[in-house]
Image (cartoon, grey):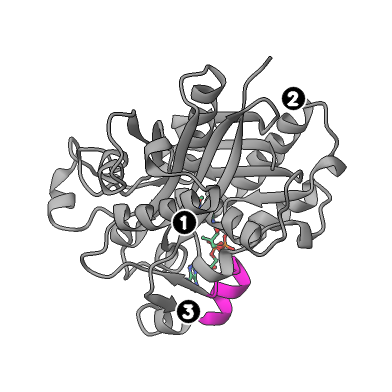
Amino acid sequence: MATYSRIVGTGSYLPEKVLTNAALEQMVDTSDAWIRERTGIEQRHVVEDGEHTVDLAEKASRRAMDAAGVKPGEIDLIVVATTTADQVFPSTACLLQSRLDIHGCPAFDVQAVCTGFVYALSVADKFVQTGTSKCALVVGAETFSRIIDWTDRNTCVLFGDGAGAVVVKADQNPGILSTHLHADGDYAKLLHVPSGVSNNYSAVQEGRAYVEMDGSDVFKMAVRTLGAIVDETLEANGMQRGDIDWLVPHQANIRIIQATAKKLRMPLDKVVITVAKHGNTSAASIPLALDSAVRAGDIKAGDMLLMEGFGGGFTWGSALIKY
Ligand code: UT7
């Protein structure tokens, strides 16, 4: 009998410090009205000095493990999706493993920017399907505020910090029905941080390794690509649009989310929308949205969920899940 993976617990965490649109009006030439109208964002959470990606990941993970009723010792795989790792190495997953007092199981990071959580979930799903893992912790955690130029109004109004996590267990019933991952590196320059350890390291040393984005080109590609992946996902599962109970999208821009909902002919009350409260938290945004809808009692056992994300690379992906 086939083995599936099932999400058995969710958790999330947002740092306490809130940065409102009104506060941003004091920092750059922008307005609350522009940000709300063009993005749907009202506020974002940002870390304090000394607060790191692993801190957010730990809090979200503990909440997910509590919700799942799983003890740290039962976790046999840790996959963390992040673009904003605390250190060059060890991976954030290894730092998290130590925090959780888990020892010996594989732990590694996945880097696919805003699609990171879908990539990480897909990897964990494969470990479970092959019998390599029975109980995996999958996390999306970011401190994007550290790679934002807070004087650039094109990017600084968009992003925030946060973490979300799920516990995934082996089960004879589905579960994760399918995952679909894609990338095309030819688009790297439309959305990137053009510096790192082995290239333009001086920018890192001088604290100016910042996100650069051609927003309107990214917007158009995101809408087109996410529309196509909806079709791909439904077709792979022999499903119709009406079979989906909830769309759980990456939270980058309300207008991108609305376009995907329209493609699915889904009313917006069947779409999990949290972008207003935390902006684009990259790899954290899908598990943050999932956890908020689960805790609100909106997403219930047996519901059919479609997760989708798009981000730097470009990368894009989806997951069809019977919750
Ligand atoms: O996570 C995955 C990757 N990221 C995304 O998916 C983000 C994709 N892109 C977007 O969400 C949108 O393109 C933005 C929100 C970034 C921009 O919205 P837009 O409707 O595409 O605006 P635009 O780039 O066409 O700019 C319109 C105007 C420009 O002024 P001019 O040239 O028309 O005079 C910008 O300079 O808005 C200006 N502008 C701003 N004005 C006030 C850009 N940023 C701001 C700002 N406040 N923060």
The front one of 198 and 154 is 198
Q: Which residue does the image show at 73% across and 52% down from the upper left?
A: 300
Q: Which residue does the image show at 35% across and 45% down from the upper left?
A: 83
Q: Which residue is mark 1?
A: 63
Magenta span: predominant SS is: helix
Q: Which residues are magenta?
A: 30-42
How far apart, in angstroms, are the residues tagged by discs 2 and 3?
A: 41 Å
243 in relation to 216, above or below: above
Q: Which residue is mark 3?
A: 21
Could you say whether the residue bearing mark 1 is in a helix, strand or loop? helix
**Quick check: marks 2 and 3 in contact, CB under 8 Å?**
no
- Give percent across and percent down for residue 212: 37, 53
88 in relation to 248, above or below: above
User: Is 213 displayed left or right of 277 in the figure?
Assistant: left
Could you say whether the residue bearing mark 3 is in a helix, strand or loop? helix
- Tag shown at residue 236: 2
- Other-residue count near label 1 (Cα within 10 Å), few / some / many at <14 / 14–19 / ≥20: many
Q: Is mark 1 within 8 Å of ligand 1?
A: no
Residue 111 visible:
no
Query: Which comes sooner in the sequence, label 2 or label 3?
Result: 3
Residue 42 visible:
yes
How far apart, in angstroms, are the residues tagged by discs 1 and 3?
A: 29 Å
- Give percent across and percent down for residue 108: 33, 33
317 in relation to 260, above or below: above
